[in-house]
Image: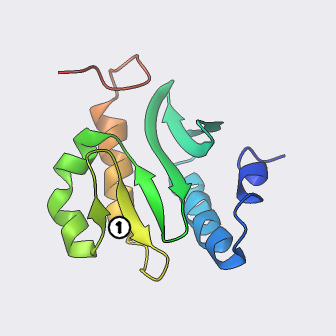
Amino acid sequence: MHPFEEWLNTVEDLNHRQKIQEILTWIETEFPILEKKIAWKQPMFTAHGTFIIAFSVSKKHIAGAPEHAAIDYFQESFKQAGYETTKELFRIKWAQPVDYDLLKKIIQFNIEDKAEITTFWRPQS
């Protein structure tokens, strides 16, 4: 069984399930080196044991959580894409298109920025 299959089946709205599944499948295809797991009740991708990105869904949006360093680094890009942000995540409303170019940059940033990090989360600065 695929690591995300059981979680995807908990997304009741079929259109929402399809959209988040497309995002997860796209990441798997673009970044086959990333490990897939469910933790804290959400699908996430890791590299060499360190967190890269996770997703959750709500009634109004998909939340992407790439850690605050990526949120800070891409703040202007999130605004241009029309995505709301908090300190730790960005929100893609269900009706909004997914900016896959931005998503690719976020994931590449985390992979490169965390290449030497041996802990799950970035060390607190």
Q: How many numbered discs?
A: 1
Q: In this orientation, which residue lies closer to the viewer: 18 or 88? A: 88
Residue 78 position within the rendered picture, expressed as x and y whole percent measured from the top left:
24, 65
Residue drawn 37% across the image and 38% down it: 111
State the scheme by which the image is colored.
rainbow
Q: Secondary structure at mark 1?
A: helix
| Residue 123, above or below 46 | above
Residue drawn 17% across the image and 21% down it: 125
**Residue furthest right as drawn:** 1
**Residue furthest front as drawn:** 59
**Residue furthest bottom as drawn:** 95
Residue 19 position within the rendered picture, expressed as x and y whole percent measured from the top left:
59, 72
User: Mark 1 is on which residue type?
Assistant: Asp
- Residue 21 placement, left or right of 96: right
Residue drawn 37% across the image and 45% down it: 66
Residue 33 visible in image: no
- Residue 4 placement, left or right of 110: right
Identify residue for label 1: 101
Residue 29 visible in image: yes
Residue 67 position within the rendered picture, expressed as x and y whole percent measured from the top left:
33, 40
Q: In this orientation, which residue lies closer to the viewer: 118 or 81? A: 81
Graded by Cα atoms within 10 Å as few (under 14), some (14 to 19) or many (20 or more), the crowding at tag 1 reads few
| Residue 120, above or below 34 | above
Residue drawn 27% across the image and 74% down it: 81
Q: In this orientation, which residue lies closer to the viewer: 28 or 120? A: 120
Residue 90 position within the rendered picture, expressed as x and y whole percent measured from the top left:
34, 58
Q: In this orientation, which residue lies closer to the viewer: 2 or 75? A: 75
Q: Quadrant of residue 102?
A: bottom left
- Residue 34 placement, left or right of 74: right
